[in-house]
Amino acid sequence: MQLAEYIDSKRQEHLNELLEFLSIPSVSTKSEHKADIQRAAEWVANALQRAGMQRVEIVPTSGHPVVFAEWTGAPGKPTILLYGHYDVQPAEPLEQWTSPPFQGTIRNGNLYGRGTADDKGQVHIHLKALEALMKHEGRLPVNVKVMIEGEEEVGSTNLWNFVEQFRDRLQADALVVSDTSMLAKGVPSVTYGLRGLNYYQIEITGPAQDLHSGVFGGPAPNPLRILCELFAKLHDKNNRVAIPGFYRDVAPLSPKERKALNALPWNKKEFLKTVGAKGPGYVPEQGYSIIEQLWCRPTLELNGIWGGYTGEGAKTVIPSKAWAKFSTRLVPNQDPEKIARLVEKHIRKLLPKTVTCKFQVLSMGKPWVAPFDHPFFQAAQRALERGFGKKAVFIREGGSIPFVTQMYDTFRVPCILIGFGLPDENAHAPDEHLNLENYFGGIKSIAFFYQELGQLKANGSKRK
Amino acid sequence: MQLAEYIDSKRQEHLNELLEFLSIPSVSTKSEHKADIQRAAEWVANALQRAGMQRVEIVPTSGHPVVFAEWTGAPGKPTILLYGHYDVQPAEPLEQWTSPPFQGTIRNGNLYGRGTADDKGQVHIHLKALEALMKHEGRLPVNVKVMIEGEEEVGSTNLWNFVEQFRDRLQADALVVSDTSMLAKGVPSVTYGLRGLNYYQIEITGPAQDLHSGVFGGPAPNPLRILCELFAKLHDKNNRVAIPGFYRDVAPLSPKERKALNALPWNKKEFLKTVGAKGPGYVPEQGYSIIEQLWCRPTLELNGIWGGYTGEGAKTVIPSKAWAKFSTRLVPNQDPEKIARLVEKHIRKLLPKTVTCKFQVLSMGKPWVAPFDHPFFQAAQRALERGFGKKAVFIREGGSIPFVTQMYDTFRVPCILIGFGLPDENAHAPDEHLNLENYFGGIKSIAFFYQELGQLKANGSKRK
């Protein structure tokens, strides 16, 4: 039996195991899920053990633990460091899910549930590819180190301490990450660029207490209105971020890359359908295509606003406080710390003297872009074409994995992002799902990828 | 024993009874409090019975019931219709209360609790004044009809049907309402003007579902940002409402009234201290004093905004929807229906084509102003000066009692608003309270007021 055939014979077994993994509500942003996070880490450790990995450890951090394992039985072959995360986004709003978020459910060839696409389903692809190679071939074709963290959805706060601590054991010739999407259904993709992410929260205080809007309305400063007026000033009419210096360090796209990106089989119609907004359906930035906006342009987005009375019926209140959560997506070569300073400075400048403002940076993460002509990238492309029987492409993504840049800065090795999600699979939203054919094709592709890498030397050159 | 002495002897008894009334959480805006509303209505009915009123009824409506009672044993004397409400605002945010909102607590000569000032405490002043007259004099000096409703805090939705139904029985020579404030501590006041109130809610929908802010951020229309940009356009730089036609029907203040209002012993410093905002502490409207802004100028205020992720930590979402509750305070001669149309039309015009908007008018209420030279108003002034031993003044208020205008439009009789609250008593906010001296002085003043009215004919002229 060929390896591909062997993997296909295990479909039901793989799926059942993934359903178990998905059932653990490992929401990293909420402290009430601390025990679930621990359970998820243990689940991953057990799966690595079953796959035949060695030295499996659950490494505690000041936050959520990192699961680490290795197999180094292929001297002279490349060493791969695999990264993924077992934590997930909150499932709220719960009432918008068609089936329970932590009970994987198959509908129309898709597996629905929180973490299916981001990132438990993709982590599981790797676990099963390693297990298949080990069980079918008796060994791995390369050396593999595995690091699965539990804080990706909260900015990988404590991962960096772990990396410093495990620096020697993490040494590898390439980093492999599956936490991104394919360009579209049937288009296997390798990602070579990500946006960075800074996440902020502000609390604006006007009156010392809530006030009656009749008795005080007019002269009383209303923090809700002040919050609105603030955020209305953070974009100009051309949909650009109106913070002085915000674009100063943005690296221009080369004409060659621009041409390649715009030639991709990316479906604007599909994008607009997924967004599902009225009228033109999107907000253009003059001089840039939608794909350039999504992948190569920085943003400032409100992620949450609240304040005043939000219950049933009417309450005639001028509240004391108003809040907003918002984020900036960053592109090469914007520096997160510099951007955070510019954002805070400008917001403080715009706010009227009647209010005070508590400004918090909840997390920071650099943007990243890689040269995709390295032999490891080419090996990934070949493996995907074998696994899916379709042409594979090189893409960028609008999302952020802050860790990738930090890893690149530290180890200076190629970072290869092979994603098996799809852009319309509702990562971070209700009804998150993963296409089952991509899940099953992914397991084969990753197994092939390690076989392809096994044909190369550690530096990527061909073995004689 | 004089009447005043008799009333003073009952202080503790009156207070204990008020504490019982306050303990019923009769929050009209929340359906879960329906049973409490019913209990509060029954409590009022029992108190009227004990006061010696006749034909006490709890009249059901499509919403919350109205309590009605009358005493008509003074033929030839004026007939007074007393109005108040037994419903209260929600107590949220609960954590900002020093003592439990539905457990009246005395601190520093004030009684704290939801409804102390607005309006249970003031209703109770009337109940006890009637009871004292009845028990001390054996009768009332005038004819009295009492109507205490349960929907004032939700726009008196069903009261008008009740008024239509009871129209004949409600006939009176004057309407008396205690649901307003004194100008300041030690300044007993009669209110002759109120702002009207329209309350609105909008729901803005952009994307068909929540989206990942990395994968979609940039071209995806963000309803939170669109909401902010909308409300930023609803005021101009001079703090005026930027809705075409909004000020068209505003009646100018006469120089005489303007002079009188600005000569009142109103304390700007006290106002700024209560608001408690930084810097200048308030937002001016050019050409108007703060007191004119508060009482004689219309407003548009946000009362609540929400959308996206508002929990602990970070969630990188572009939500599908954003919401706002907001209201317009209206002044003579603005027409609520016309204003609602102007507001909706302008909002729909300002919103981009990428979003849809559900626009709701939750309630509407007219502004009101009365001539205060009528003998009944003069009687009220004299009674207050006797009850408090201080000079009483004529004032307007920024708050709204939509019912007053409707009653005036229907019965065309003087409406006399005698308030015993204070502007800094946190009506509609945490730590609502009522000054106990105003409560006790109020009971005496109202009893004196009915005695003064008993000296007049039904049309207000002096009895020979």
Image: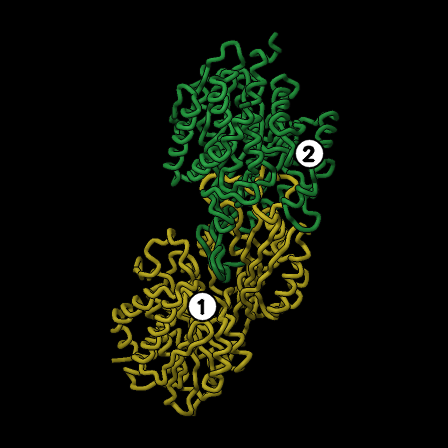
Chain colours: A yellow, B green
Residue A133 visible, this orientation = yes
Q: Which mark is residue A180?
A: 1
Task: Work out whether B373 lies above or below B400.
Answer: above
Percent position (x, y) of residue A400?
51, 67
Q: Quadrant of residue A91?
A: bottom left
Q: Residues within 10 Å of mark 1 (few under 14, many from 20)?
A: many
Labels 2, 1: one chain:
no
Identified by mark 2, the residue type is Glu
Percent position (x, y) of residue A369?
55, 73
Q: Quadrant of residue A383?
A: bottom left
Question: Chain ID for label 1?
Answer: A
Q: Image point 35% across, 77% down: which residue?
A: A45
Closest to the observer, A88 or B441 = B441
Q: Image point 38% across, 33% down: which residue?
A: B38
Q: Residues within 10 Å of mark 2 (few under 14, many from 20)?
A: many
Identified by mark 1, the residue type is Thr
Residue A461 visible, this orientation = no
Please, which residue is most extreme toward the front here? B1
Question: Chain ID for label 2?
Answer: B
Q: Are marks 2 and 1 in contact (CB under 8 Å)?
A: no
CA–CA distance between discs 2 and 1?
Answer: 59 Å
- Labels 2, 1: front one: 2
Position of B391 with respect to B312 (left or right) is: right
Task: Identify the element where label 2 is drawn.
Answer: helix
Percent position (x, y) of residue B174?
55, 18
Percent position (x, y) of residue A130?
34, 79
Task: Identify the element where label 1 is drawn.
Answer: loop
Q: Which mark is residue B292?
A: 2
